[in-house]
Image (cartoon, helix red, strand yellow):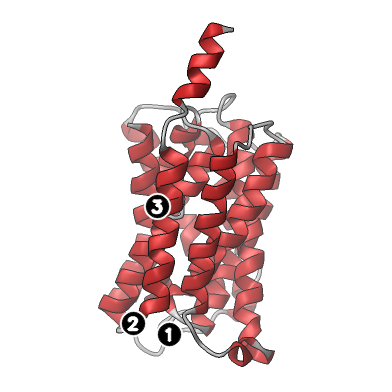
Amino acid sequence: MYYIYVIVASLMWSFVGIMVKTASGMVDSSMITLCRFLFGAAFLACFLLLKKKRLRVFWRDKWIWIGVVGKSGNYIFENIAITMGFVYGNIVVWPVQAIFLAAISVIFFKEKMYLRKVMAVIFCIAGVILISWRGVPLKEFSGTNLIPLGLFALAAIGAGIYIISQKKLVDSMNSLNMNFSAFLLSSILTAVPVPFTFKVPIEFNVLAICSLVGLGIVTGASFYLYAEALKRIPFLVAVMISNSSVIFTLLWAWLFYHEVINGYMLAGTVIMLTGLVLINIPYRKQKTTEKEE
């Protein structure tokens, strides 16, 4: 069941690029960032009230603030980069985040790195890098073309920091209130630049408005499911499964924005899926050895 939670969360994240690109036709990236947090907090607040639970804002724990800074940076950099480039550009986040969190899972959370797990991480990262490259000449990744890639890399580190904060808090805090607190505090933080950058839309677009609300719902629902899953499944496995959103991101970019999907990208998808399969094969021998001891 908890593996399904991660898969559903990953599917939700795959729509982010499409919704950000759609919303960017009406509002700027700072407003998109604010709406992601504000509507996300509102969604979780409604969910808490429906479950007849008390609304609580946790703000004294340092890990809440670490998560707020990380997630705010994640959305700020990601939204700017998507508005500058391709819809599927945010898949660049995953290889950087995978490397960052794989290192953290071993150093910080003391998870063991078996050979097969190392190979799985390499396959996942190689697959996403191949998709990101898509066979274009390397000279295209120079100058201003590198700016979105750099922004996505910063977004990946911010996303990784938020996941670490979730892992640290999920056993001591209700996951609904934890994410509600983080998103509410993040909405206050990211609201600061809005008065200076906001421009009244010349024309209101229904799809853009729906995308802004949808981004909030995705933010609230996906991170609640992800936090619940982190209670039950290994940290690194959750990270690797979340890479599956890359596949759907490419599909939506092709369907809705007619962006080109070539052989390099398809090969990268196959390589990444191989890594996901490797990391999810049970360690039967290891479990047997532990019982004998």
**Spatial CA span between label 2 and label 3:** 30 Å
Q: CA distance from mark 1 to mark 3?
A: 31 Å
Q: Residue at x 32, y 82 (%)?
A: 257
Could you say which quadrant of the image residue 60 lies in?
top right
Residue 176: x, y in percent? Answer: 46, 35
Tell me whether circle 1 and circle 3 mark residues in contact (CB < 8 Å): no
| Residue 72 visible here | no
Residue 183 point in image, percent of width and height: 54, 49
Q: Is the Cβ of the residue at disc 2 closer than 8 Å to that at disc 1?
A: yes
Q: Residues within 10 Å of mark 3 (few under 14, many from 20)?
A: many
Q: Residue at x 36, y 46 (%)?
A: 7
- On the image, the x and y values in percent for residue 18 come to 37, 72
Q: Which residue is mark 3?
A: 10
Q: Which mark is residue 292?
A: none
Name the residue tied to disc 2. Answer: 204
**Where does the N terminus fall, quadrant-wise?**
top left
For disc 2, the neighbor class at 10 Å (few under 14, some 14 to 19, many from 20) is few
> Residue, x 64% and y 40% (percent of image)?
165
Residue nearer the viewer, 72 or 117:
117
Per the image, label 1 sits on a secondary structure element best described as loop
Image quadrant in which you'd find residue 20: bottom left
* Residue 201: numbered disc: 1
Helix, strand or loop under label 2: loop
